[in-house]
Image: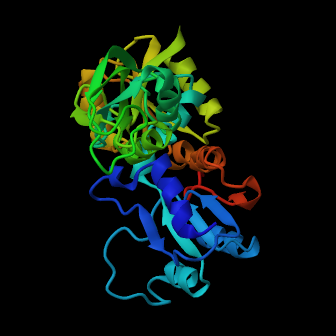
Amino acid sequence: MKIKNLLEDLNIIAPFFLQENFDNSGIQFADLEKHSNKILLCLDITNKTLNEAKKKRANLIISHHPLIFSSLKQITKQRNPLLYQLITSQINLITMHTNYDLAENGLNDYVGNILGIKKKAALQDSSEKIFKFAVYVPKKHAEKVSQSLFDAGSGKIGNYTETSFNISGTGTFKPEKGTHPFIGEIGKKEKVSEIKIETVVPERNLQPVIQAMKKSHPYEEPAYDTYEITNIHSGGIGLWGNTDKEQELESFSLWAKKKLNAKYVRLVKSNDRKIQKVALCTGAGSSLIENVKQLDVDLYISGDITYHHALRAKEIGLNLLEIEHFDTEKFFVESLHKQLVKQGIPEDILIKSQVMDSPYQLL
């Protein structure tokens, strides 16, 4: 598979336009015409993961954290040793950072499932647009066209799939010279019993859905409408939802530590509420504390909580569980691996890094 084709699959999994303004997800270094023989999945580009890629003969790395965050005016072996090695070794690099954090079924959803959180919504909505898509189809062909729309990525609302609304009516048209009508005669007005199929489509799937409709629709020129809607959102940063049962704060915190196989956790206990309504943001989530407070959750789980943010959580009565950045985001590898296999990427070319570790040591 060429890297440019793989990039299209990654853009379906987590569209790169979803990334935050500060981020640099996407291509870091690549020959787009090159075939990817082996692909290493990892959290960070380090000496260990780079050497692992060389040892496993991987010519492409997909990392969560970007190696290049901001503009570079020069690259030297002394100042940029990892980037220099990457380029001179002709190892291509693609990064899926905040776009994968924000995407539906991305990193937050994966970790939320591990912790048994039944997702209600994101903590902060993504910028991806959602469209209403409507097409008019002869009754006999409605089921075929409808299924093609769903298969191409339409009809998902929350945990429901293949959602649509269907209305019966009468379509009229008159084929003119030069047309090849499926129904009717040239120059004669035709009336046909039709079904109007309405469904929802995220921005990333809009063009595939239109193409699938045209391929399955019997008409030469099918009539269809698209328009943006604002009451449904696709993905977003973090999540909140409920667990199956209430637990005491300390026991839930220790259970979460075990489930995530974390080396340590830090707890800010601000009240005596039992824990069932939980918010989560993998990685660094200090900036979302005020958003989380508005949700009236029992506990907020995140990483990189500064001293002053911990004090703020205490002040506003928010229970806060800090889990190290690495221990919430190491699941990027397993999560993306599953998504790539689902997209049809051969499993035998995917390598899950075995050398990732946190830069911190506990003494």
Q: Is residue 277 visible?
A: yes
Report the residue at 70% width, 58% height from top: 350
Taking 112 as reference, is 169 left or right? left
Viewer-side residue, 147 vs 180:
180
| Residue 283 in sight from this viewpoint | no
Residue drawn 39% across the image and 55% down it: 16
Foreground residue among 309 and 193 = 193
Toward which corner of the image does residue 131 lie, by quadrant?
Answer: top left
Residue 294, percent from left and from top = 24, 22
Position of 233 compared to 43: left or right?
left
How has the structure been colored for display? Answer: rainbow
> Residue 24: x, y in percent?
37, 63
Q: How many marks?
A: 0
Along the line of sight, the residue nearer the viewer: 362 or 123 = 123
Q: Nearer the viewer, residue 176 or 132?
A: 176
Q: Position of residue 34 (x, y in %)?
A: 59, 77
Q: Position of residue 349 (x, y in %)?
A: 73, 61
- Relative to 199, say whether 81 is above or below: below
Q: Is residue 259 left or right of residue 187?
A: right
The N terminus, quarter of image: bottom right
Q: Quadrant of residue 227?
A: top left
Q: Considering only vertical position in the picture, is 278 above or below 359? A: above
